[in-house]
Image (cartoon, rainbow, N blue to C red):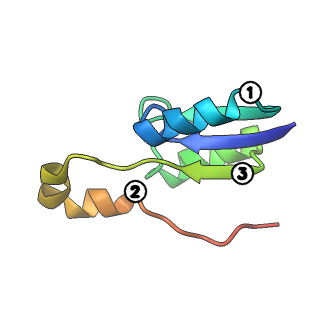
């Protein structure tokens, strides 16, 4: 069974993805800030090592524009783009 890790699963996009994946033969590994801080590299590596997802979808973000403007470093820390490993 395909495992899909959805980071930010409690947000609007994460919930919508879960609605789409629910009827499929796909195991959703849902996390949000209360379960896993994606800005903590050790936490992310540990979760990935333990759960071995096939796909990772990052739906995290800050939707409060005032918060983003007040703390741009924190807002940008949620954005990470990398090449898939094989």
The quadrant of the rendering that contains the N terminus is top right
Could you classify mark 3 by the number of other residues whose Cα lies within 10 Å: few (under 14), some (14-19), or many (20 or more)? some
Residue under numbered circle 2: 78
> In 3D space, how far apart are the residues under numbered discs 3 and 1 (Cα atoms)?
17 Å
**Residue 5 horizontal side relative to residue 75, left or right:** right
The quadrant of the rendering that contains the C terminus is bottom right
> In 3D space, how far apart are the residues under numbered discs 2 and 3 (Cα atoms)?
18 Å
- Judging from the image, what secondary structure is the residue with disc 1 in? loop
26 vs 44, nearest the viewer: 26
- Judge depth for marks 3 and 1 and give the one in front: 1
**Residue 71 horizontal side relative to residue 59, left or right:** left
- Judging from the image, what secondary structure is the residue with disc 3 in? strand
Please report the residue visible at 12 percent of the width from the left and 57 percent of the height from the top. 70
| Cβ atoms under marks 2 and 3 closer than 8 Å | no
Query: Looking at the rendering, which quadrant does residue 77 occupy?
Result: bottom left
Mark 1 vs 2, N-terminal side: 1
Residue under numbered circle 3: 55
The percent coordinates of residue 74 (x first, y second) are 28, 57
Residue under numbered circle 1: 23
The percent coordinates of residue 34 (x first, y second) are 42, 29
Mark 2 vs 3, N-terminal side: 3
> In 3D space, how far apart are the residues under numbered discs 1 and 2 (Cα atoms)?
29 Å
- Judge depth for marks 2 and 3 and give the one in front: 3
Could you classify mark 2 by the number of other residues whose Cα lies within 10 Å: few (under 14), some (14-19), or many (20 or more)? some
- Judging from the image, what secondary structure is the residue with disc 2 in? loop
């Amino acid at each position: 069974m395909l495992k899909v890790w959805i980071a930010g699963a409690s947000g609007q996009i994460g919930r919508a993805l879960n609605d789409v994946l629910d009827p499929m033969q796909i195991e959703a590994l849902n996390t949000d800030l209360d379960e896993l801080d994606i800005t903590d590299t050790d936490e992310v590596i540990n979760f990935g090592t333990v759960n071995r997802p096939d796909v990772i979808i990052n739906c995290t973000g800050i939707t409060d524009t005032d918060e983003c403007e007040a703390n741009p470093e924190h807002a940008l820390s949620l954005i990470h783009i990398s090449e898939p490993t094989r």
